[in-house]
């Protein structure tokens, strides 16, 4: 896209900062930290998650973490800039994707609905 047309990015958050007043604030902080997109160029498409993913995480002896369930709160954001420098220790890749390319049918339907 060229110019100031909005772009959309899915974000998954890890709630770890006591300064985050709302889940959407934590998601926006994570998005900007991990993708290098300036916070001033990102706005949430809504205040509620578009999807909540739950999946098992195996034990990690190096971190002293037992096996547990991970709850991923996914929010939809609008941005008018490209992805910046990603945080390599947290993110392996970041890219703009069309809703149609999302394999998870539930997530895809919710994103399409949120974009209406």
Image (spheres, grey):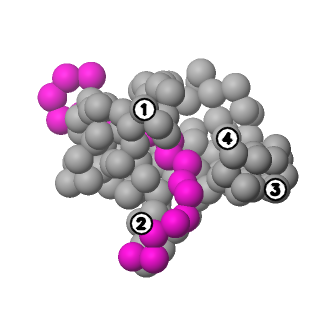
The span from disc 4 to disc 1 (Cα, nearest Å) is: 25 Å
Q: Earlier in the sequence, mark 2 or mark 3?
A: 2
For marks 4 and 3, give the one nearer the viewer. 3
Q: Secondary structure at mark 1?
A: loop
Measured as percent of width and height from the top left, residue 108 is found at: 64, 35
Q: Earlier in the sequence, mark 4 or mark 3?
A: 3
Q: Quadrant of the N terminus?
A: top left
Q: Earlier in the sequence, mark 4 or mark 1?
A: 1
Give the residue drawn at x 75%, y 46%.
60
In the rendered image, which quarter is residue 18 located in? bottom left
Tell me which segment is drawn in magenta.
Answer: 1-19
Residue 107's tag is 4
Q: For the residues labelled 2 and 3, say whether their Cβ atoms are less than 8 Å apart.
A: no
Q: For the residues labelled 4 and 3, say whether their Cβ atoms are less than 8 Å apart.
A: no
| Circle 2 residue | 25
Q: Earlier in the sequence, mark 3 or mark 1?
A: 3
In the rendered image, which quarter is residue 52 located in? bottom right
Q: Is residue 55 visible?
A: no
Compared to residue 67, the image places residue 84 above or below, namely above
| Circle 1 residue | 88
Q: Secondary structure at mark 2?
A: helix
Viewer-side residue, 85 vs 6: 85
Q: Is residue 30 visible?
A: yes
Measured as percent of width and height from the top left, residue 116 is found at: 49, 45
Is 15 inside the magenta-drawn segment?
yes
Viewer-side residue, 103 vs 17: 17
| Circle 3 residue | 66
The span from disc 2 to disc 4 (Cα, nearest Å) is: 20 Å
Give the residue drawn at x 41%, y 48%.
31
């Amino acid at each position: 896209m060229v110019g100031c047309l909005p772009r959309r990015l899915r974000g998954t958050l890890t709630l770890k900062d006591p300064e985050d007043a709302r889940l959407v604030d934590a998601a926006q902080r994570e998005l900007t930290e991990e993708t290098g997109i300036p916070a001033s160029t990102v706005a949430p498409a809504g205040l509620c998650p578009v999807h909540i993913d739950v999946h098992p995480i195996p034990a990690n002896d190096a971190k002293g973490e037992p096996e547990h369930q991970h709850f991923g709160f996914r929010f939809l954001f609008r941005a008018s800039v490209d992805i910046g420098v990603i945080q390599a220790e947290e993110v392996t890749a970041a890219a703009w994707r069309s809703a149609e390319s999302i394999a998870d049918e539930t997530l895809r339907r919710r994103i399409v609905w949120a974009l209406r």
